[in-house]
Image: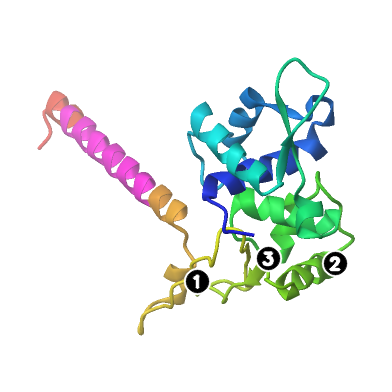
Amino acid sequence: MRILTPLEARVLGVLVEKQATVPDTYPLSLNALVAGCNQKTARVPVIEATEAEVLTAVDGLKALSLVFEGSGSRVVKFEQNLARVLNVPGAAAALLAVLMLRGPQTAAELRLNCERLHRFADISSVEGFLDELAGKTPPLAVKLARAPGEREARWAHLLCGEPAQPAARAGGGDATMDSVGAGELAALKAEQTRLAAELEALRAQVARITRELGLD
């Protein structure tokens, strides 16, 4: 099977997810599929795909037999065929779907995020299915090198090709700083800016009060 585009992987992941989480509205119409792809929660990265782009991705998946059109409805609806095409059990398909939707994750994160798709007994069960995916020919998942400052290694799917490995820390770096994510750093900078503005406002208020009281 050829390498999937990121949007094809997103479409496939959405179909697997929605089949488990909203079975009453599955198979999905094009509108529902676009909404699922552009969902603001449980998606990394968040995207803004158009109907035309999603339909192109669907056509590509249909050519691989990973998606097919459902029957019995006046509105065209789409179903996924991931487990059968890749010859993997439902639990492994759930892991692949969450990896396609949320990016690389640790086994513990995968167990938590897969809860609505498949309930794993423990983390070792998750790792067992991940090892099976990694051992297939060709492999469908890979365990990434542990990133600097992280306690556990993350797993990634290989349906879109080889993922980027965590960057090595340059010599002399501080481990504590390495463990701070970009979002945390941005939040700290925003808080620093807010506190600086508050301090400036307090200084101005003290200066005004001092002038009104005739104090030096």
Q: Is residue 190 magenta?
A: yes
- Confirm or deny contact between disc 1 and disc 2 (CB under 8 A): no
Residue farthest along the bottom direction in this orientation: 171
The amino acid sitting under disc 2 is Ser
Instruction: Count the numbered circles shown.
Output: 3
Residue range of the region highlighted in magenta in the rendering: 189-208
Q: Where is residue 114? Give x, y as percent.
A: 77, 51
Q: Which residue is mark 3?
A: 140
Q: Which residue is mark 1?
A: 165
Mark whose residue sits in front, 3 or 2: 3
Q: Where is residue 22? Give x, y as percent.
A: 79, 31
Q: Where is residue 32? Give x, y as percent.
A: 66, 26
Can the viewer see residue 61 in this picture? Answer: yes
Q: Earlier in the sequence, mark 1 or mark 3?
A: 3
Residue at image position (68%, 71%) is 139
Q: Quadrant of the N terminus?
A: bottom right
Q: Is residue 13 left or right of residue 175?
A: right
